[in-house]
Image: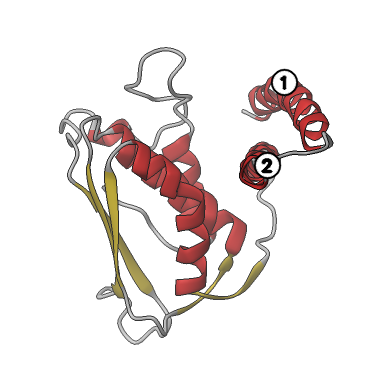
């Protein structure tokens, strides 16, 4: 698995570096419209995110320490919405959050961002005609007396998953998407992130 991951990182890293180089040239051009500059900077930040994801994928094979910190849930969601709002708008998908604004998490923020972006992107792919996504956060009913354990429920109005496929969805390299449209890594990475935080993910 580690050799496969390293090969994947190399294959992805090379074109990413080339694309980033061209973006830096574009950003250096004089007279750029402010809106164009903003969009190029968003693209640059997302290329950096992809690079971080590739490095994190390598790190996951080595079980790294989490960089956990106190994170206010509204702040995390606000940052996420800034990233995924253009994608949701383009696919006519609405997003709703149902959560107490006082919720504070102790998590690796970057891994949480990766977790929710993966899940939301999957939901969008399941709604080709548009739809809705709802994220509910409440006290984990299975936590007993353990404080600070939260249950996140992400629901969408998409096509759903056939029962015979459900046992396979978290396996690395498993995907129902056409060739070239998915790596089969998204949900397996989500499971690793959740487990690294001492939680469990279920469909």
Q: Are marks 1 and 2 in contact (CB under 8 Å)?
A: no
Identify the residue at the far top of this view: 179
Task: Name which quarter of the figure residue 66 lies in.
Answer: bottom right
Closer to the camera in the image, 134 or 28: 28
Task: Name which quarter of the figure residue 32 lies in.
Answer: top right
Q: Residues within 10 Å of mark 2 (few under 14, many from 20)?
A: few
* 27 relative to 179 in the view: left or right: right
Residue 15, which numbered label? 1
Task: Name which quarter of the figure residue 61 lies in.
Answer: top right
Depicted 43 relative to depicted 165: above or below? below
Q: Residue 20 at what x, y percent from top left?
A: 76, 31
Look at 27% across and 40% down and name the residue there: 92
Assign a secondary structure to mark 1.
helix
| Residue of label 2 | 33
* 175 relative to 77 in the view: left or right: left
* 115 relative to 133 in the view: left or right: right
Does the rendering let one see residue 167?
yes
């Amino acid at each position: 698995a580690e050799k496969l991951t390293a090969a994947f990182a190399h294959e992805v890293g090379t074109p990413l570096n080339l694309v980033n180089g061209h973006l830096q040239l574009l950003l250096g051009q004089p007279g750029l419209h402010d809106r164009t500059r903003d969009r190029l900077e968003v693209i640059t930040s997302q290329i950096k995110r992809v690079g971080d994801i590739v490095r994190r994928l390598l790190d996951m094979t080595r079980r790294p320490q989490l960089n956990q910190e106190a994170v206010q849930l509204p702040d995390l969601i606000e940052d996420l919405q800034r990233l995924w709002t253009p994608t949701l708008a383009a696919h006519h998908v609405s997003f709703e959050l149902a959560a107490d604004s006082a919720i504070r998490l102790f998590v690796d923020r970057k891994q949480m961002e990766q977790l929710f972006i993966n899940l939301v992107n999957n939901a969008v792919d399941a709604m080709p005609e548009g739809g809705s996504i709802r994220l509910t956060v409440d006290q984990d009913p299975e936590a007993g007396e353990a404080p600070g354990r939260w249950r996140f429920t992400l629901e969408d109005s998409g096509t759903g998953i056939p029962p015979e496929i459900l046992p396979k969805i978290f396996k690395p390299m498993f995907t129902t998407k056409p060739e070239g449209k998915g790596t089969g890594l998204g949900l397996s990475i989500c499971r690793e992130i959740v487990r690294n935080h001492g939680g469990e993910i279920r469909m």
